Image (cartoon, grey):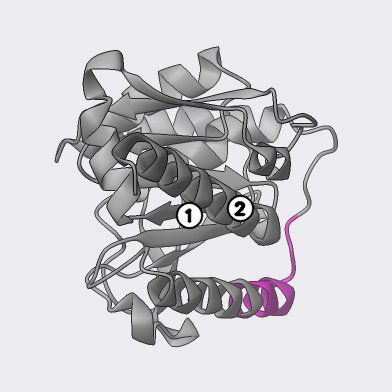
Amino acid sequence: MHAIIRAMARSRKGSASKPSRRAPRNESRARFDKLAAGLAEAGRSFYQRGWVFGTSGNFSAVVSNEPLRLAITSTGLDKGALDAKQFLEIDDRARVVRGNGKPSAETGLHLAIACTRRAGAVLHTHSLWSTVLSDAHAAAGAVTIEGFEMLKGLDGVHTHEHREILPIFENSQDIAELAAQVQARLESDAAMHGFLLRRHGLYTWGRDLAEAKRHVEILEFLLEALGRSKSGV
C-alpha cells in the first residue's frame, strides 16, 4: 500500500497548478491545530445527528501538500466527545509525525482520496441509512439518486435532474486492496462525490473542510430521503 500511496502523492504534487512551498514549522502547526479543531467540531455535530455512533467514523484534512501531511482521527474514539488534541498528523506512508496514538485503520482510504482527488478533507460516516442502503443496493453495485432538489448542494451540480451515482465497494479488512479499488474508480469517474462501503458507511470529500462537511450533510439527507421513500416511512 505504501508504494501506491507514495506514487499518488507524487502525482498530487506534480498535477498541482502551482508548485507548493514548504510551510514554516510554526505555520504548519497553526494550520494543523485549526484543522483538528474544525474536524473535532464536525465529528461532534455528526454524532448529534446520528451519523457516527460509538467509535464509528473517521475524519481527515490536508495540512500540507509538499510534503503530504494529513490531520486524522486516532482510532477507537467516541466521536460525541471528540477533541482536537486527539488528532494525529501523518505523512504519505501513514506514519505519525505529530501527536500520540494510532491512526484510523482506514487511513489508506483517506490517503488514496486525498491524492487522487486532491481533496482538502475526507469525511467518513456510519449512518443507519448509508449502512442499510449500501446492503440493499449491493447487487446493483451502486446507489443512484436523482430528482431531489438537495442534489444542488453537491459541488458542480446545478439541477435537481442530476443523477448522482454512489458506487458500493465490498467492505474489507484488507485496506491496501480496498484503497486500490477506490483509487481505480476515482480515476475513472471524475463526477462522483462519494462512495459507500457495504454494510459500513459513506465516504465523501471536498476541496476544503467546509465543502466536505456540506457534502456529508447533503448525501446523508439524500440517502435518508431515498430510504424512507422506498420503505414508505
Q: Residue 123: which numbered mark, if any? A: 1
How much space separates mark 2 and mark 1, taking CA atoms? 7 Å
Q: Is residue 202 visible?
A: yes
Q: Is residue 69 above or below residue 155?
A: below
| Mark 2, other Cα within 10 Å: few <14 / some 14–19 / many ≥20 | many
**Residue 43 among those drawn in magenta:** no
Which quarter of the picture shows residue 9?
top right
Residue 224: x and y, percent?
42, 48
Q: Is residue 122 above or below residue 33?
A: above
- Residue corresponding to mark 2: 212
Residue segment shown in magenta = 22-33
Judged left or right of residue 169, residue 190 is right
Name the residue: 64% across, 51% down. Answer: 120
Judged left or right of residue 188, residue 75 is left
Judged left or right of residue 23, residue 46 is left
Which quarter of the picture shows residue 131?
top left
- The overriding secondary structure of the stretch rendered in magenta is helix
Residue 99: x and y, percent?
40, 78
